[in-house]
Amino acid sequence: MKNISDSEWKVMKVIWSKPPMLASEIIEKLSEETDWNPKTIHTLIRRLVTKGVLKAEKEKNYYSYYPLVSEEECVQAETKTFLEKCFEGSFNVMISNFIKGDKLSDKEIDELEKLLESKKSR
């Protein structure tokens, strides 16, 4: 999957929330969250179509936009890119760095332990 910029990610979040969506609906939603003008949003939508992340389907005088990849797939791809860029692909180094540098509550530690135990028992 091609990299999605932070701005494109915001567009995708809107579309994943309620697909399919018209450009006008995407613009309306993003106008509540950003100060982008409609032309900027149209440009971002076109880029996502070009990247193969969105599908544009013409219906009468307008287009409906459908995600071609799930949010989960994008999160996985972004996570992999982040790991490779910052931690040479090592999940262990990332977790170690996170735990050393962050103040975790007892509740967060318990949650991490439960996640690890459930992964171990599989």
Image (cartoon, rainbow, N blue to C red):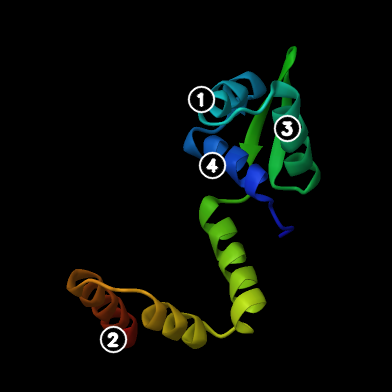
Could you say which disc has been placed on residue 56 in the image? 3
Q: Which residue is mark 2?
A: 121
Does label 3 or label 1 sit earlier along the sequence?
1
Q: Are circles 1 and 4 on residues that touch, CB within 8 Å?
A: no
Judge whether 18 appears above or below 23 on screen. Answer: below
Element class at badge 4: helix
Q: What's the residue type where badge 4 is placed?
A: Lys
Give the crowd class for mark 3: few <14, some 14-19, many >=20 residues within 10 Å.
many
What is the C-alpha distance between the residues marked 3 and 4? 16 Å
Tag 3: amino acid: Ala
Q: For the residue carrying disc 2, how many other residues have a C-alpha within 10 Å: few (<14), some (14-19), or many (20+)? A: few
Q: Residue furthest right?
A: 50
Q: Is residue 53 left or right of residue 110?
A: right
Depth-wise, is mark 4 or mark 2 nearer the camera?
4
Sequence-wise, the earlier of marks 1 and 2 is 1
Question: Nearer the observer, disc 3 or disc 1?
Answer: 1
